[in-house]
Amino acid sequence: MSRSLLDTRLRSLLKESRDRLKVRELCYCYDIANPGDWRRRLKDNRRFLRSFVKRRHLFASSKQALQLWRRKSSFIAEARLNLAPLFNQAVFVWPEHQLPPRLQRQIKEMGAASLVTISIPCRLSTRFTGRFTLMVQAGEQVEHLKANLAEIEQYLSQLQMEIIMSHGKEINPLIDYNIVSPVSAYVLACLAEGQDREQVSKQLSLTLRGVDYHIGVLKEVLGARTVAQMMFEAARCRLV
Protein backbone atom coordinates (compact mmCIF):
# COMPACT_ATOMS: atom_id res chain seq x y z
CA MET A 1 0.00 0.00 0.00
CA SER A 2 1.29 3.48 -0.85
CA ARG A 3 2.18 5.85 1.95
CA SER A 4 -0.49 8.36 0.92
CA LEU A 5 -3.22 5.70 0.95
CA LEU A 6 -2.06 4.44 4.36
CA ASP A 7 -2.15 8.00 5.73
CA THR A 8 -5.63 8.54 4.33
CA ARG A 9 -7.04 5.32 5.77
CA LEU A 10 -5.62 5.84 9.25
CA ARG A 11 -6.56 9.53 9.30
CA SER A 12 -10.15 8.54 8.56
CA LEU A 13 -10.13 5.96 11.38
CA LEU A 14 -8.59 8.41 13.85
CA LYS A 15 -10.97 11.19 12.86
CA GLU A 16 -13.95 8.94 13.53
CA SER A 17 -12.46 7.93 16.89
CA ARG A 18 -11.64 11.54 17.75
CA ASP A 19 -15.28 12.51 17.29
CA ARG A 20 -16.47 9.53 19.30
CA LEU A 21 -14.11 10.36 22.18
CA LYS A 22 -15.02 14.06 21.89
CA VAL A 23 -11.45 15.32 21.96
CA ARG A 24 -9.81 18.05 19.89
CA GLU A 25 -7.45 15.73 17.99
CA LEU A 26 -6.20 12.15 18.21
CA CYS A 27 -2.73 10.90 17.28
CA TYR A 28 -1.44 7.33 17.06
CA CYS A 29 1.78 5.40 16.69
CA TYR A 30 2.62 1.71 16.93
CA ASP A 31 5.56 1.79 19.32
CA ILE A 32 8.12 -0.36 21.06
CA ALA A 33 6.93 -1.14 24.58
CA ASN A 34 10.31 -0.77 26.26
CA PRO A 35 13.39 0.86 24.68
CA GLY A 36 15.57 -1.16 27.05
CA ASP A 37 14.65 -4.32 25.14
CA TRP A 38 16.52 -2.99 22.11
CA ARG A 39 19.70 -1.56 23.61
CA ARG A 40 21.75 -3.58 21.15
CA ARG A 41 20.68 -1.00 18.58
CA LEU A 42 19.44 1.96 20.63
CA LYS A 43 22.73 2.10 22.48
CA ASP A 44 22.18 5.30 24.46
CA ASN A 45 19.54 7.94 25.15
CA ARG A 46 20.89 10.29 22.49
CA ARG A 47 20.60 7.66 19.77
CA PHE A 48 17.16 6.68 21.03
CA LEU A 49 15.93 10.29 20.88
CA ARG A 50 17.28 10.64 17.35
CA SER A 51 15.41 7.51 16.28
CA PHE A 52 12.32 8.69 18.18
CA VAL A 53 12.22 11.91 16.16
CA LYS A 54 12.93 10.30 12.79
CA ARG A 55 10.00 7.87 12.95
CA ARG A 56 7.81 8.05 9.84
CA HIS A 57 4.82 6.07 11.00
CA LEU A 58 3.01 8.74 12.98
CA PHE A 59 -0.67 9.25 12.25
CA ALA A 60 -3.29 11.77 13.33
CA SER A 61 -6.90 12.76 12.84
CA SER A 62 -5.88 15.83 10.82
CA LYS A 63 -2.86 17.10 8.92
CA GLN A 64 -2.52 20.00 11.37
CA ALA A 65 -2.40 17.63 14.34
CA LEU A 66 0.24 15.50 12.61
CA GLN A 67 2.40 18.55 11.92
CA LEU A 68 2.11 19.63 15.56
CA TRP A 69 3.00 16.15 16.79
CA ARG A 70 6.10 16.04 14.62
CA ARG A 71 7.17 19.44 15.96
CA LYS A 72 6.58 18.14 19.49
CA SER A 73 8.90 15.21 18.84
CA SER A 74 11.62 17.55 17.59
CA PHE A 75 11.25 19.78 20.65
CA ILE A 76 11.53 16.72 22.89
CA ALA A 77 14.81 15.69 21.28
CA GLU A 78 16.25 19.20 21.41
CA ALA A 79 15.37 19.56 25.09
CA ARG A 80 16.44 15.95 25.81
CA LEU A 81 13.35 15.43 27.93
CA ASN A 82 13.07 12.33 30.06
CA LEU A 83 10.68 10.02 28.23
CA ALA A 84 10.72 7.26 30.86
CA PRO A 85 7.22 8.20 32.17
CA LEU A 86 5.81 7.88 28.65
CA PHE A 87 7.01 4.27 28.47
CA ASN A 88 6.29 3.38 32.11
CA GLN A 89 2.81 4.82 32.64
CA ALA A 90 -0.43 3.62 31.07
CA VAL A 91 -1.71 7.21 31.13
CA PHE A 92 0.80 10.03 30.74
CA VAL A 93 -0.26 13.67 30.99
CA TRP A 94 2.43 15.72 29.29
CA PRO A 95 3.68 18.31 31.85
CA GLU A 96 3.03 21.70 30.31
CA HIS A 97 5.84 23.40 32.24
CA GLN A 98 8.40 21.11 30.58
CA LEU A 99 7.26 21.95 27.06
CA PRO A 100 8.96 24.86 25.27
CA PRO A 101 6.86 28.09 25.24
CA ARG A 102 6.62 27.98 21.45
CA LEU A 103 5.17 24.47 21.54
CA GLN A 104 2.74 25.45 24.32
CA ARG A 105 1.52 28.31 22.15
CA GLN A 106 1.06 26.04 19.13
CA ILE A 107 -0.93 23.56 21.21
CA LYS A 108 -3.25 26.33 22.40
CA GLU A 109 -3.63 27.59 18.82
CA MET A 110 -4.90 24.11 17.96
CA GLY A 111 -7.64 24.60 20.55
CA ALA A 112 -6.13 22.10 22.99
CA ALA A 113 -5.36 22.59 26.67
CA SER A 114 -3.53 19.34 27.47
CA LEU A 115 -1.90 16.35 25.83
CA VAL A 116 -2.65 12.91 27.26
CA THR A 117 -1.01 9.72 25.97
CA ILE A 118 -2.75 6.41 26.67
CA SER A 119 -0.63 3.32 26.00
CA ILE A 120 -2.46 0.19 24.90
CA PRO A 121 -0.43 -3.06 24.99
CA CYS A 122 -0.51 -4.98 21.73
CA ARG A 123 -2.35 -8.28 22.11
CA LEU A 124 -0.29 -9.81 19.30
CA SER A 125 3.18 -8.99 20.67
CA THR A 126 4.20 -8.04 24.21
CA ARG A 127 7.15 -6.10 22.79
CA PHE A 128 4.90 -3.50 21.17
CA THR A 129 2.25 -1.07 22.30
CA GLY A 130 -0.09 1.43 20.70
CA ARG A 131 0.24 5.02 21.90
CA PHE A 132 -2.78 7.24 21.47
CA THR A 133 -2.19 10.91 22.21
CA LEU A 134 -5.39 12.80 22.90
CA MET A 135 -5.43 16.58 22.54
CA VAL A 136 -8.12 17.69 24.98
CA GLN A 137 -9.85 21.05 24.98
CA ALA A 138 -9.97 21.67 28.74
CA GLY A 139 -8.24 20.47 31.88
CA GLU A 140 -11.51 19.01 33.12
CA GLN A 141 -11.40 16.53 30.25
CA VAL A 142 -8.27 14.96 31.72
CA GLU A 143 -10.20 14.06 34.87
CA HIS A 144 -13.07 12.77 32.73
CA LEU A 145 -10.64 10.54 30.83
CA LYS A 146 -9.21 9.14 34.05
CA ALA A 147 -12.68 8.54 35.50
CA ASN A 148 -13.74 6.61 32.38
CA LEU A 149 -10.37 5.05 31.66
CA ALA A 150 -11.51 1.41 31.54
CA GLU A 151 -14.14 2.15 28.90
CA ILE A 152 -11.75 4.32 26.87
CA GLU A 153 -8.98 1.73 27.03
CA GLN A 154 -11.37 -0.96 25.81
CA TYR A 155 -12.38 1.19 22.86
CA LEU A 156 -8.77 2.08 22.00
CA SER A 157 -7.74 -1.58 22.31
CA GLN A 158 -10.32 -2.50 19.67
CA LEU A 159 -9.11 0.35 17.46
CA GLN A 160 -5.53 -0.79 17.94
CA MET A 161 -6.40 -4.34 16.84
CA GLU A 162 -8.21 -3.03 13.77
CA ILE A 163 -5.13 -1.03 12.78
CA ILE A 164 -2.61 -3.78 13.50
CA MET A 165 -4.53 -6.57 11.79
CA SER A 166 -4.68 -4.46 8.62
CA HIS A 167 -1.38 -2.56 8.71
CA GLY A 168 0.83 -4.02 11.46
CA LYS A 169 3.59 -5.21 9.16
CA GLU A 170 3.67 -1.92 7.25
CA ILE A 171 4.11 0.19 10.38
CA ASN A 172 6.31 -2.19 12.39
CA PRO A 173 8.11 -0.20 15.13
CA LEU A 174 11.39 -2.08 14.72
CA ILE A 175 11.69 -0.78 11.17
CA ASP A 176 10.33 2.64 12.10
CA TYR A 177 13.08 3.08 14.72
CA ASN A 178 15.61 1.54 12.30
CA ILE A 179 16.30 -1.17 14.86
CA VAL A 180 15.86 -3.46 11.87
CA SER A 181 17.05 -1.78 8.68
CA PRO A 182 14.96 -1.92 5.50
CA VAL A 183 17.57 -4.16 3.83
CA SER A 184 17.57 -6.55 6.80
CA ALA A 185 13.78 -6.63 6.59
CA TYR A 186 14.02 -7.59 2.89
CA VAL A 187 16.47 -10.37 3.77
CA LEU A 188 13.99 -11.66 6.35
CA ALA A 189 11.16 -11.57 3.82
CA CYS A 190 13.19 -13.58 1.31
CA LEU A 191 14.16 -16.18 3.92
CA ALA A 192 10.52 -16.42 5.01
CA GLU A 193 9.62 -17.28 1.40
CA GLY A 194 12.01 -20.24 1.59
CA GLN A 195 14.89 -18.74 -0.37
CA ASP A 196 18.44 -19.82 0.47
CA ARG A 197 21.41 -17.46 0.89
CA GLU A 198 22.38 -17.63 -2.78
CA GLN A 199 18.85 -16.77 -3.91
CA VAL A 200 18.64 -13.89 -1.44
CA SER A 201 22.01 -12.65 -2.68
CA LYS A 202 20.84 -12.68 -6.29
CA GLN A 203 17.44 -11.10 -5.65
CA LEU A 204 18.75 -8.25 -3.49
CA SER A 205 22.03 -7.74 -5.40
CA LEU A 206 24.05 -8.47 -2.27
CA THR A 207 27.20 -10.50 -1.87
CA LEU A 208 26.93 -13.67 0.22
CA ARG A 209 29.00 -11.85 2.80
CA GLY A 210 26.44 -9.05 2.76
CA VAL A 211 23.59 -11.52 3.27
CA ASP A 212 25.47 -13.11 6.17
CA TYR A 213 26.07 -9.68 7.68
CA HIS A 214 22.36 -8.90 7.76
CA ILE A 215 21.55 -12.34 9.15
CA GLY A 216 24.14 -11.76 11.87
CA VAL A 217 22.66 -8.38 12.77
CA LEU A 218 19.16 -9.85 12.87
CA LYS A 219 20.29 -12.66 15.15
CA GLU A 220 21.84 -10.12 17.50
CA VAL A 221 18.81 -7.82 17.51
CA LEU A 222 16.32 -10.65 18.01
CA GLY A 223 18.45 -12.54 20.52
CA ALA A 224 18.67 -15.65 18.34
CA ARG A 225 21.47 -18.20 17.91
CA THR A 226 20.22 -19.98 14.81
CA VAL A 227 18.42 -18.93 11.65
CA ALA A 228 15.40 -20.99 12.69
CA GLN A 229 15.25 -19.22 16.04
CA MET A 230 15.73 -15.89 14.29
CA MET A 231 12.75 -16.57 12.02
CA PHE A 232 10.65 -17.60 15.01
CA GLU A 233 11.47 -14.37 16.86
CA ALA A 234 10.87 -12.35 13.69
CA ALA A 235 7.39 -13.86 13.45
CA ARG A 236 6.73 -13.01 17.11
CA CYS A 237 7.70 -9.41 16.32
CA ARG A 238 5.47 -9.51 13.21
CA LEU A 239 8.36 -8.76 10.89
CA VAL A 240 7.32 -11.65 8.63
Image (cartoon, helix red, strand yellow):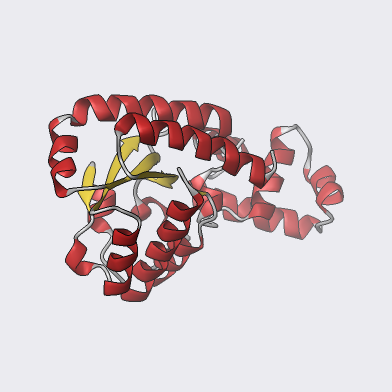
Above or below for 66 versus 142: below
Q: Residue at x 38, y 50 (%)?
A: 37
In the image, residue 23 sits, relative to residue 20, either above or below, namely below
Residue 239 visible here: yes
Q: Position of residue 12 (x, y in %)?
A: 52, 35
**Left or right of 34, for residue 215:** right
The quarter of the picture where residue 122 lies is top left
Q: Residue 43: in sight, yes or no?
A: no
Q: Nearer the viewer, residue 16 or 56?
A: 16
Residue 157 lies, in percent from the top left, at 35, 28
- For residue 149, above or below residue 99: above
Residue depicted at 36% across the width and 70% down the height: 75
Q: Residue at x 29, y 24 (%)?
A: 154
Q: Position of residue 148 (x, y in %)?
A: 17, 29
Whether residue 93 sits left or right of residue 119 in the image: it is left
Q: Quadrant of the C terminus?
A: top right
Q: Which quadrant is the N terminus positioned in?
A: top right
